[in-house]
Image (tube, rainbow, N blue to C red):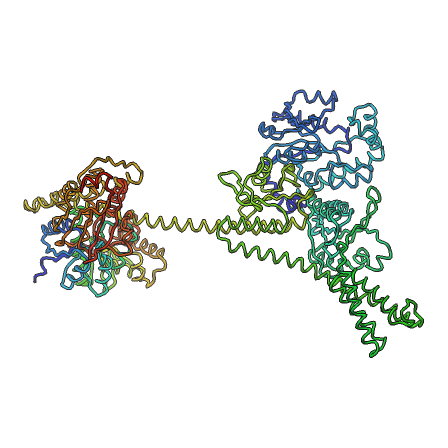
């Protein structure tokens, strides 16, 4: 925001690019009808212009136009579409406000919005109308609006000086800079006063008196000049932009920079406004700087607030803000060091009203600055004499605590005891050094005031106990008067110096603590592995460092939801959620203390990364007033940035994991594809090869050879069919379409059927069956069960060498019926006994396999489990060989009947 | 001389394929020996064969490994790969390891027999090391470094001639990009260079350079010079 405003204010060589970008985003155009005072005819002029556009065929609506009952104005409004206003209950009255949503929904080409500086009723989306207008512009709607010059933020102070009336409703200069067109509505002061007399100027009754003195010819002339000058300045800027974009060389001031020094006094805001005006005239950028000293750290809340307010104002005016820790030197040194490092050409300071006496003691910043600024221009701005009560020195020393003074007292008392001890030996001349030690000790341990207290005590004690006449406060010898005077002087100087060193150390420590906290926070974040860890750490850190309650929201399915909070929080009120949502969609702060939706309980700020917002953090506290000081705000921003980075890192790691997993899945998938294509092509190769052999070489073949080839074609076709059936079974299993059709079955009978079907496959092996008799019937799907057995037999035949024996054993073990297929092959690698049931298990083995589908066991397991049984693979204990074991629990009644 | 009947070793783990090849190739007057896996194939290769038909997906030592071991021990017997793998990466690998041809399953018996014949001829040629090469209209004298198209001498640059010589010496065989680069330039860095030289060579020796008949492109794999008819 700062930067944008600055860029707009100072047209740069890429003005062309910017105007092109504007066109690209189709941002609405803003035209401001600027007047010097109420009654000059801004609304009238706006309506005339709008009617002209309407005639051109532009879609114009009046979003809000105040006619104040004037007939001529009313008549102009006649042809225009007037949008309904939004009614807002405000205490006892009902106010009507512009309804931005209605305008957005209507989406005209041009909207008329009267009185840009208007303050919206509480409960509106934005506290100020100009923010509504910005939203309309962003939505691509052109806006005509009206504005009186005294409402312009940077002119506010000047107008107040001219008219003695401070206007509360202001609009930031940025919106004037944003305007594509500003038209000054000019009326000679005499004519305006004439209109006022004729009652043609609307005046709210309660402000009548004040306004009448406002409309003096002198005031009006001054205001008129201001309005015209502001417009001219604007025209200037446009001209400059034009010259730059057309590569016309010209005498524009390049590289001017304005630095305004602000402190914690009521003057600060005025200084910022002044700096902004000077910077605008110079087409320069402005920076507001505050040098933080031990003194400024100890200011009371009211003065800190005024400083914070000045810094916020700077932000609104598009002035960059900087807070510098004092380098332990004089403020002037810090200011000039910063100014020189940043090529500042103008320094603006306020003229302080300090007494000559304090200036002599503490030095004057202004005179130091003027003396040492070198080629930098120094502007000294007088503090306005009116309005503000003379500054009350409300600086709080560290709240009055007795302990430091007691300590100082103790130091002096100790010094006294030591002095009494050494005085006989070393003489009275050296006693003052002992007291000086006590003063330094007090300054180091307790600061300036306790050490001054120690100075007083020491002086008195020295006098009372050591300077003759003893035990009185009178001094006999005049040389002793001088000695005591110099002792006091030295003690005061020493305590001052020591206390200054101490306070710098205090600031340094405070900063070091902050830095350390940030560092440890970033280390903590670096250790977080999950997003939830990061969010929680961030919530906790913000809560403990800023003393506020924290909620963190992240988007879920397009809506924000609370993901962490300290103290834990689950739900947000609707108003808060709306503010959070606004913050998310606009990537800008909202809620309490912000420009948008200030009615929310919390303040919301976006967590930003280079890729855009990734979440929203909300803060609140029970304390009334501003939630964060500018310093805290900066700290908060730093914490947010760190958190956002950590969160992004976690997301990136997760993305990387996903990518890796996807790559692995891809690899597996391509292995499966290779495997399936091999399984489909191998039998096909035999079929096609045999068929083409018969076709092409048929004459050279004898009958037996032909018959063999035909047999191959049939066998391989069947194999292909089995493979396809397997694939279909697998698909059915995976899609959940498989429903076993169970009936009570004799297992032995199904074993027989499976053996029969597998006879051809098992031709090379011996088969032995060991089946217990009189086993109970089991609830099975006979088709599925036969397929399971067939697959197990097929498997055994494939993996056990020809000529070996395959055993089928069926027996009862307690309440279970157990069926085993045992072969005499190489067995299953111990690590793979679970993996063999994985789909395409053999695919992992690459080319080292016998021909098979890699689906048989996977399908078998699917079928077994569908019928409520289990299957497992193991190796034989007595010799190499695999054992596949099926278990089915027998029905309850079966135990008895089988006995 | 028993070598009048060419001896072919068929290596495939699928009994139906072995049976089919035996039946089909026997009708063409070849002697067939078969092996069901890589180890048996390597054992069998201690005896002399004129051609190996090799499946890649073998249990135990896979086909590529068999090929690599063969070439490693200096066995130059022509090898025809017969595999269901049809991806270019696999083909290039096979050719790089010294395969002479590559037929994908499923296949037609006639095509296979034609390819077997070409491979057998190539085997004979490599051994003979004929100094001249004749392909209807194209004459290449490797000793005198003279190239004639339809009786008219064609001027080739030294690199172009080197490229042609490698193609001629391996006529009928697919040569991978990497192999050609290594043979002609001693490097495998820039396949673009090879493409440029092949184009220049075609401009000079092909009758219609845009429709080459002598130097054929094996897409994604390499180039092959048509083998002369015997």
**Total labels drawn:** 0
Residue shown at 35% from the left, 56% from the top? B191
Q: Residue at x 64, y 58 (%)?
A: A513
Instruction: Answer with the quarter of the image where residue B138 lies.
Output: bottom left
Q: Residue furthest left?
A: A703
Quadrant position of the N terminus of chain A in the picture: top right
Q: Classify residue B198 by image quadrant.
A: bottom left
Note whether A190 is above or below A475 in the view shown.
above
Residue A765 in percent (x, y) is at 13, 51
Q: Position of residue A743 (x, y in %)?
A: 21, 35
Between B181 and A697, the residue placed more toward the observer is A697
Pick whichever, A283 or A479, lies toward us: A479
Identify which residue, A164 or A583, lies in the foreground: A583
Please provide percent x and percent y for residue A825: 18, 55
Closer-to-camera residue (A147/A876): A876
Question: Which quarter shows the C terminus of chain A?
Answer: top left
Which image quadrant is residue A110 in?
Answer: top right
Q: Residue at horizontal 75%, vertical 28%?
A: A41
The spot of residue B48 in percent (x, y) is: 14, 62
The answer to whether one can see residue A591 in this image is yes
Q: Given the current orientation, which residue lies at the most extreme bottom position?
A: A425
Could you tell whether A312 is left or right of A690 in the image? right
In this picture, is B61 found above or below B23? below
């Amino acid at each position: 925001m700062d930067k944008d405003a600055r860029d707009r204010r100072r047209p740069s060589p890429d003005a062309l690019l910017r105007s092109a970008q504007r066109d690209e985003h189709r941002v609405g155009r803003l035209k401001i009808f600027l007047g010097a005072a109420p009654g000059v005819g801004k609304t009238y002029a706006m309506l005339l212009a709008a009617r002209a556009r309407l005639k051109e065929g532009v879609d114009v609506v009046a979003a809000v136009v105040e006619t104040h009952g004037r007939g001529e104005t009313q008549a102009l409004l006649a042809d225009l579409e007037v949008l309904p206003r939004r009614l807002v209950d405000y205490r006892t009255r009902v106010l009507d406000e512009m309804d931005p949503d209605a305008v957005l929904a209507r989406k005209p080409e041009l909207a008329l919005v009267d009185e840009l500086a208007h303050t919206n009723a509480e409960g509106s989306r934005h506290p100020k109308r100009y923010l509504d207008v910005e939203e309309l512009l962003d939505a691509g709607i052109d806006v005509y609006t009206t504005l009186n010059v005294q409402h312009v933020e940077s002119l506010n102070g000047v107008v107040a000086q001219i008219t003695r009336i401070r206007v509360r409703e202001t609009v930031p200069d940025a919106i004037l800079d944003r305007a594509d067109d500003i038209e000054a509505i000019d009326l000679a002061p005499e004519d305006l006063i004439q209109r006022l007399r004729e009652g043609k100027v609307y005046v709210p009754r309660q402000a009548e008196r004040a306004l009448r003195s406002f409309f003096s010819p002198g005031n009006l002339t001054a205001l008129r000049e201001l309005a015209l000058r502001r417009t001219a300045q604007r025209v200037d800027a446009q001209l400059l932009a034009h010259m730059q974009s057309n590569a016309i060389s010209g005498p524009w001031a390049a590289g001017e920079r304005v630095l305004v020094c602000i402190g914690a006094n009521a003057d600060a805001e005025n200084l910022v406004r002044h700096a902004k005006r000077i910077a605008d005239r110079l087409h320069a950028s402005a920076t507001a700087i505050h040098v933080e000293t031990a003194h400024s750290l100890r200011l009371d809340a009211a003065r800190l607030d005024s400083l914070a307010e000045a810094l916020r104002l700077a932000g609104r005016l598009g002035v960059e803000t900087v807070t510098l820790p004092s380098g332990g030197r004089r403020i002037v040194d810090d200011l000039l060091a910063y100014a020189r490092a940043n090529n500042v050409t103008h320094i603006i300071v306020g003229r302080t009203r300090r007494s000559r006496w304090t200036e002599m003691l503490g030095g004057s910043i202004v005179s130091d600055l003027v003396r040492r600024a070198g080629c930098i221009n120094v502007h000294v701005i007088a503090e306005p004499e009116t309005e503000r009560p003379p500054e009350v020195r409300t600086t709080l020393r560290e709240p009055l605590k007795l302990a430091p003074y007691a300590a100082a007292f103790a130091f002096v008392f100790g010094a006294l005891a030591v002095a009494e001890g050494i005085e006989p030996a070393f003489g009275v001349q050296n006693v003052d050094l002992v007291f000086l030690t006590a003063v330094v000790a007090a300054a180091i341990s307790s600061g300036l005031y306790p050490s001054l207290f120690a100075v007083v005590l020491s002086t008195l004690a020295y006098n009372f106990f050591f300077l003759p006449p003893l035990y009185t406060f009178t001094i006999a010898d005049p040389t002793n008067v001088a000695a005591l005077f110099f002792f006091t002087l030295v003690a005061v100087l020493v305590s001052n110096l020591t206390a200054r060193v101490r306070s710098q150390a205090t600031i340094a420590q405070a900063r070091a603590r902050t830095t350390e906290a940030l560092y440890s926070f970033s280390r903590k974040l670096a250790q977080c592995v999950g997003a939830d860890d990061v969010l929680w750490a961030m919530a906790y850190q913000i809560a403990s460092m800023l003393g506020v309650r924290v909620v963190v929201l992240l988007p879920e399915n397009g809506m924000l939801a609370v993901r962490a909070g300290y103290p834990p929080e689950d739900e947000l009120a609707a108003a808060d959620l709306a503010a959070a949502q606004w913050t998310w969609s606009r990537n800008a702060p909202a809620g309490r203390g912000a420009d948008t939706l200030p009615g929310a309980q919390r303040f919301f700020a976006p967590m930003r990364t280079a890729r855009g917002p990734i979440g929203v953090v909300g803060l609140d506290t029970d304390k009334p007033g501003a939630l964060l000081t500018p310093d805290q705000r900066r700290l908060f921003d730093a914490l947010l940035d760190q958190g956002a980075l950590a969160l992004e890192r976690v997301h990136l790691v997760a993305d990387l994991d996903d990518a890796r997993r996807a790559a692995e899945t891809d690899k597996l998938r391509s292995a499966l594809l290779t495997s399936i294509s091999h399984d489909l092509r191998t039998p096909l190769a035999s079929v096609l090869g045999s068929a083409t052999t018969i076709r092409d070489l048929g004459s050279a073949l004898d009958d037996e050879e032909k018959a063999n080839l035909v047999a191959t074609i049939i066998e391989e076709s069947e194999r292909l069919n089995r493979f396809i059936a397997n694939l279909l079974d697998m698909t059915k299993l995976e899609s959940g379409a498989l429903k076993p059709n169970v009936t009570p079955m004799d297992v032995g009978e199904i074993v027989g059927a499976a053996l029969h079907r597998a006879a051809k496959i098992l031709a090379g092996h011996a088969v032995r069956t060991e089946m217990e008799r009189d086993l109970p019937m089991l609830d099975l799907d006979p088709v599925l069960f036969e397929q399971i057995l067939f697959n197990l037999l097929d498997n055994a035949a494939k993996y056990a060498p020809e000529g070996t024996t395959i055993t089928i054993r069926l027996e009862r073990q307690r309440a279970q019926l157990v069926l085993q297929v045992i072969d005499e092959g190489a067995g299953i690698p111990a690590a793979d006994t679970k993996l063999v049931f994985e789909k395409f298990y053999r695919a992992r083995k690459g080319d080292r396999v016998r021909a098979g589908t890699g689906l048989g066991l996977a399908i078998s397991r699917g079928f077994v489990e569908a019928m409520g049984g289990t299957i497992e693979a193991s190796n034989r204990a007595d010799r190499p060989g695999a054992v596949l074991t099926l278990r089915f629990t027998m029905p309850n009644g079966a135990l008895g009947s089988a006995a | 001389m028993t070598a009048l009947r060419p001896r072919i070793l068929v290596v495939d783990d699928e009994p139906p394929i072995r049976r089919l090849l035996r039946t089909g190739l026997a009708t063409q007057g070849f002697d067939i020996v078969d092996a069901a896996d890589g180890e048996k194939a390597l054992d069998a290769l201690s005896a002399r064969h004129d051609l190996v038909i090799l499946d890649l997906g073998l249990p135990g030592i896979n086909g590529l490994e068999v090929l690599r071991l063969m070439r490693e021990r200096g066995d130059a017997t022509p090898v025809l790969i017969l595999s269901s793998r049809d991806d270019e990466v696999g083909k290039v690998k096979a050719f790089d390891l010294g395969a002479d041809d590559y037929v994908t399953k499923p296949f037609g018996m006639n095509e296979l027999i034609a390819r077997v014949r070409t491979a057998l001829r190539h085997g004979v040629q490599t051994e003979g090391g004929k100094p001249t090469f004749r392909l209807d209209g194209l004459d290449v004298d490797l000793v005198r470094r003279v190239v004639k198209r339809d009786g008219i001498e064609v001027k080739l640059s030294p690199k172009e001639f080197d490229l042609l010589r490698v193609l001629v010496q391996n006529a009928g065989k697919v040569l991978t990009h990497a192999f050609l680069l290594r043979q002609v330039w001693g490097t495998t860095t820039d396949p673009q260079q090879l493409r440029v030289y092949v184009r220049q060579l075609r401009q000079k020796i092909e009758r219609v350079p845009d429709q080459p008949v002598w130097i054929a492109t094996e897409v994604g794999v390499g180039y092959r010079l048509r083998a002369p008819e015997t």
